[in-house]
Amino acid sequence: MKYFNFTFIVFIAVLFLTSCHKPQPKTTEQKLSDFFQKDSVTILVTDSGLGGLSIAADVTERLRKFKVFKQAHVVFLNAQPGPHTGYNDMKTTDQKVRIFNNALRAMNAKYQPDLLLIACNTLSVLYDQTDFAKDASLPVVGVVQAGVRLIESKMRNLPNAKVIIFATKTTVNQGKHKALLVKDGMAPERIVAQACPGLAGSIERGPFSEKTQALVRQYVDQALTKLNDVHAPLFASYNCTHYGYVDTLFRQAFKEEGRKVLGYLNPNPYMADFIFSKENVNRFAQTSVRDSVVSQIEISPAKIRNISALIRPVSEQTAVALEHYHLLPHFFEWKSIANE
């Protein structure tokens, strides 16, 4: 009996010591430090649609210009689940989170990326709720933080200024932009959130179509009615990666309303700035960069024409990759969850 008690005590002690010495998960900063030690990397950019291709195009060209790595593969993955189903169409947040989690697992298994850029505000606000986020071994960076930093930088010295956050329904309902801005000291009454249902899809189908123009005018009008001070300095922030494609339409809509805007804020070009900081550039004589565009759903020829025309001035290579995209049907499971 004494032997049994002694063995049991030793067993418990070993368990205790093992748990005490369990390695702590790496922070994002530590993961990024590891990332910048590599010569060859895969950078995966994802969006629930094609808006994030503007970020993929920017990353592709800056990798070539600033020579941070010897070789780089930029993969853009359209994480829209079905041809007529996006995350904003789903009934519950739980469904959105679980489906995005399936997409993340599939991306990681197939491409084993060294860095994941969530170039979608909707998916960025869902990410922290996924199981993938709890044990991800790679650095994951969302576009929300870039948007918040941009808004803060413009409004810091203008205490009376207000900002309209144009975003999808999910992004507005989650309220992460506003919460982060308020946490950093911005008064909540300075922030107006305007949901824009259907606008991202309309931009893909026809960025300058009558339907897209009408939607932009409608949402600008709705946002302006929420302002309690019509004379306050104003910023308009594009917190869906699609909206920067139609910057001219937003500008025209505000002009038609007779409302002066101090600045139209598009965080897309700033999202990947951390990759190209001074200490990381010119590590190599040149960088070989290749692009891939991947989608679970078919991308119509019209959408390919529309979006490739918009990103080609930034990156011919990314535009060509879109025109020759890889279709991976059944890449991740979503129907069983969406139909619950």
Image (cartoon, rainbow, N blue to C red):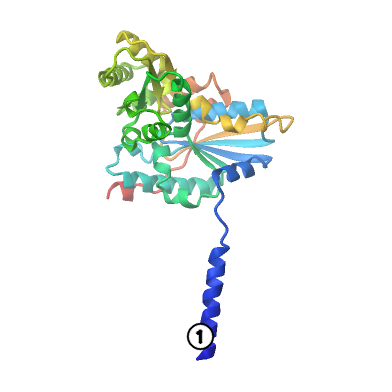
Residue at the image point whose x is 48% and y is 30% from the top:
146
Residue 85 seen anywhere in this rendered image of the structure: no
Residue farthest bottom in this picture: 1
Q: Is residue 192 left or right of residue 294?
A: left
In the foreground, 44 or 191: 191
Question: For mark 1, what is the residue?
Answer: 5
Mark 1 is surrounded, within 10 Å at the Cα level, by few (under 14), some (14 to 19) or many (20 or more) other residues, namely: few
Q: Is residue 125 above or below residue 59?
A: below
Q: Is residue 20 above or below residue 42?
A: below
Residue 273 seen anywhere in this rendered image of the structure: yes
Based on the displayed image, in which of its 4 quarters is residue 189 positioned?
top left
Based on the displayed image, in which of its 4 quarters is residue 275 positioned?
top right
Q: Is residue 1 above or below residue 322?
A: below
Where residue 142 sits in the image (x, y, percent)?
A: 47, 36
Where residue 201 sits in the image (x, y, percent)?
A: 35, 28
Residue at the image point whose x is 55% and y is 79% from the top:
10
Residue at the image point whose x is 50% and y is 52% from the top:
135
Where residue 309 sits in the image (x, y, percent)?
A: 48, 20
Where residue 213 sits in the image (x, y, percent)?
A: 32, 16
Helix, strand or loop under label 1: helix
Q: Is residue 142 left or right of residue 173?
A: right
Residue at the image point whose x is 27% and y is 50% from the top:
340
